[in-house]
Amino acid sequence: MMMVVVAVVVVVKAVVMMVVEVVVVAVVMVVVVAVVVVAVVVAVVVVAVVVAVVVVAVVMVVVVAVVMVVVVAVVMVVVVVVVMVVVVAVVMVAVVMVVVVAVTDQVKARKSFLVSVVYVVLPNRLERWDFTHTFDYSPFCFALAKPVQKPSWLSCYYPLSHQVWIGIFISALVVCGTLVQITGSDMWRSQYGQLNTGAVVMEVLGSLLGQGLYGRLSTSRSNHMLVASWLVFGVVVSTGYRGSLIASLTLPRQPPRPETVEELVTAVER
């Protein structure tokens, strides 16, 4: 019996030792794996930081290089422009001096007796040259206020001239008077009935505004030609007026400005 107990104890002890060894090995492996993972993560982070630093450094170098190139280019352009201006100025001065010397040499050689050169009157020049009277340049100018555009509420009137409006008014009066005389006759009344003066005027003015006739004026053969002529006249006038009105509203007409002395005097006198 004792032998059995001892054997069981030995077996249990062996099993416990094996379990402990397995647990220890597992813990060690877990620790090793964790250390490896941490090392890998740290390595990745370090590599990422190094790459970021390198990229930032490269970008900074590129930016500095571009800025330097731009600055150098601007400086070169400025230098070239300044040099060109100086060269042009020197050339112009040299040309003027050559011309002046050539002209004065003509006088010295008695080939010319006049020199149209602006010289400063100096005592040493008076010994060799006779200067004419000097004239001061006095540029005069006249200033007037800019013409003001006509009021916008008059835009409906300005597309046509005064003469055209007067002609339209007189034509409308003549046509209205003629139609009133025709419609007021006894023959008209007996055949077509009474038509008052207001209706005739409304028919005539309505045709100018693009409105159709009601048919009462065109029932008589005696005024067919008159009504037809007035309709053609109304179509022409209304079409021209609409076109001129659209043009004047789209591009307002600027009032005329005085361009000559006569126009200036006329504008001031008004």
Image: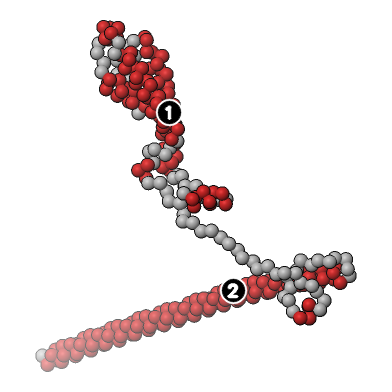
- The part of the image, by quadrant, that contains residue 47 is bottom left
Residue 204 versus residue 9 in the image, above or below: above
Residue at the extreme left: 1
For marks 2 and 1, give the CA distance. 70 Å
Q: Amino acid at mark 1?
A: Gly
Q: For mark 1, what is the residue?
A: 167
Q: Nearer the viewer, residue 243 or 179?
A: 179
Indicate the quadrant where residue 66 lies: bottom right
- Classify residue 191 by image quadrant: top left
**Residue at mark 2:** 74
Residues at discs 2 and 1 in contact (Cβ within 8 Å): no
User: At numbered mark 1, what does the secondary structure look like: helix, strand or loop?
Assistant: helix
Q: Residue at x 47, y 78 (%)?
A: 56
Q: Is residue 4 above or below residue 146?
A: below
Image coordinates of residue 150 in percent, x first then y, are: 40, 46
Which disc number belongs to residue 188? none
The amino acid marked with disc number 2 is: Val
Query: Is disc 1 surrounded by few (<14), some (14 to 19) or many (20+) residues within 10 Å?
Result: few
Q: In the image, residue 165 lies at what x, y percent?
A: 41, 32
Image quarter where the N terminus lies is bottom left
